[in-house]
Image (cartoon, grey):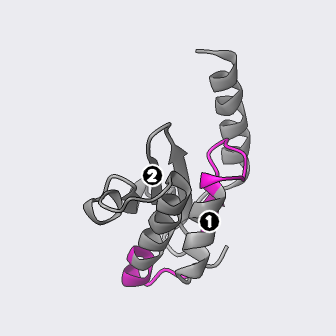
Amino acid sequence: MNSKGSARVKIKYRIRKKISGAAAKPRLSVFRSNADIYAQLIDDANGVTLAAASSKQKDIAAQKAPKTEKSKLVGAAIATKAKELGITTVVFDRGGYIYHGRVKAVAEGAREGGLQF
């Protein structure tokens, strides 16, 4: 693995030591690839993904918008799915990425959708 990738993995594990999600307060995990962005609500106590959203979903992918705007839509989508499950508070897991750009846009979209973290 390249040094940048291995550095991110180290940061990711350092973050994961400190935070974990439960059924009442799941972990909002973000993964960012070059083309797309993915968000999941994870219950670490049971090892289950409760809900997921990504920029590959048809309604989000159909929009002609910059990746940052799509990321905000992913945040709003995950917030909507959380509301349907009765979840209002989450723990944000930036996955070793800097809280900036697309990762920040997901967080802002989720907050605007009604999630608290």
Residue at (53% x, 44% y) in the render: 32
Residue at (45% x, 51% y) in the render: 38
Q: Residue furthest left?
A: 58
**Kind of residue at badge 1:** Ala
Q: Nearer the viewer, residue 45 or 42?
A: 42
Count neighbours of disc 1 (C-alpha within 10 A) and say few if under 14, some if 14 to 19, many if 20 or more.
Answer: many
Q: How many marks?
A: 2
Magenta stretch containing residue 109, yes or no? no
Residue 27 location, x and y as percent? 56, 61
Quarter assignment of residue 103: bottom right
- Mark 2 vs mark 1: which is more N-terminal? 2
In the rendered structure, find residue 1 and report the number of the disc placed on it: none
**Kind of residue at badge 2:** Tyr
* Secondary structure state at the residue bearing disc 2: strand
Q: Is residue 45 left or right of residue 49?
A: right
Is the residue 33 above or below the residue 40 in the image? above
* Secondary structure state at the residue bearing disc 1: helix
Q: Nearer the viewer, residue 3 or 11?
A: 3
In the rendered structure, find residue 107 and report the number of the disc placed on it: 1
Residue at (67% x, 43% y) in the render: 97
Residue 42 location, x and y as percent? 47, 59
Q: Quadrant of the C terminus?
A: bottom right
Residue 50 location, x and y as percent? 38, 64
CB atoms of marks 2 and 1 within 8 Å: no
Q: Nearer the viewer, residue 62 or 19?
A: 62
Q: Which residues are magenta?
A: 81-103
Is the residue 95 above or below the residue 54 in the image? above
Which residue carries the number 2 mark?
Answer: 38
Q: How far is the residue under mark 2 from the one under mark 1?
A: 12 Å
